Image: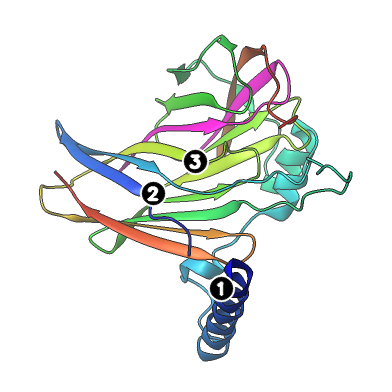
Amino acid sequence: MPDPMKIRANVVGDSTEVRVLMSHEMETGQRRDAQGKVIPAWFIQNVVVAHNGKPVLNAQWGPAIAKNPFLSFKFKGGAKGDKVEITWVDNRGEKRTDETVIA
Amino acid sequence: MQNMRRKVLKSGGAMTVYALLVAAGWLKPGDAAAQAWNKSAFEAKSMDEAMKAFGGSAPAQSKDIAFVSTPDIAENGAVVPIGITSSIPKTESIAILVEKNPNMLAASFDILPGTEPAIGTRVKMGQSSNVYALVKADGKYYVASKEIKVTLGGCGG
């Protein structure tokens, strides 16, 4: 089971700022191990963010996103106490969903 | 002991995924797990190939796309912060492309209605390169670029 995400969502002016730190290896598939074998790529491909069940951001990622990915963005219309739910799916089909409450 | 536990966990995980696939075999569109991943775009090695994969024509240079909190010189290519904001009306998506990476496209974000066209993330860069911010707005593509110098590559491990 992958480690949980760290999510922060704060109301800034009339929009909500979301900052996420995910825990993932993000292996590029370009590196080789000590035996010279290619380490297979393993990375998050899709990220979906929903605010109270309504999607606000979809992302497609490649292996060039840094290890333990960081993501920040803003959306309009969030209020304190609303739910922000984030799901990622990697290229092995593993997924993780975490949610937080807007502060 | 540790190994055994790993194996049990792994086979358990595989079973769950399999069961889910069977149960939700018909549940494709709209499901987060089945969301599209543009394989050909992520395999593109040049701007032309990437544009073909996106199904767009050559992007126009734009001054309405800005890089924020993005360094001119990155000390560590494994973690390069990139922030992009677009002030083009009707921005639909923002993509980050690194010219000299093995595959150019690093990420693409769909900006849904109500979401501000401003995103921040961190990418890996193998060497000093131009970084492109590709914005799709109202069906048209716009691009801005910034050169980032890397003093330590991100692909050597």
| Magenta stretch: includes residue B84 | no
Please give the label number shown on residue B52.
Answer: none
Which residue is at the front of the view, A73 or A91? Answer: A91
Camera-near label (3 vs 1) is 1
Tag 2: Cα neighbours inside 10 Å, few (<14), some, or many (≥20)? Answer: some
Give the chain letter at badge 1: B
Residue kind at label 3, given as amino acid type: Pro
Q: Earlier in the sequence, mark 2 or mark 1?
A: 1
Question: Of helix, strand and loop, which one carries label 3?
Answer: loop
Colouring mode (rainbow / by chain / secondary structure / one colour): rainbow
**Residue with the mark numbered 3:** A69
Q: Quick check: A3 above or below B63?
A: below
Asked if residue B114 can be seen in this view, the reply is no
Label 3 to label 1: alpha-carbon separation? 27 Å
Q: Which residue reaches farthest front?
A: B1
Q: Chain of mark 3?
A: A
Task: Tell me the residue at 76%/46% (across/down).
Answer: A29
Residue B114 pos. (x, y %): 29, 45
What secondary structure predominates along the stretch shown in magenta? Answer: strand
Q: From which residue to which does the magenta span run?
A: B115-139
The C terminus of chain A lies in quadrant:
top left
Residue A3 seen in render = yes
Nearer the observer, B84 or A61: A61
The residue singled out by tag 1 in the image is B5
The magenta stretch spans residue B120: yes
Residue at the left extreme of this rendering? A80
Q: Residue at x 47, y 53 (%)?
A: A47
Q: Which residue is mark 2?
A: B112
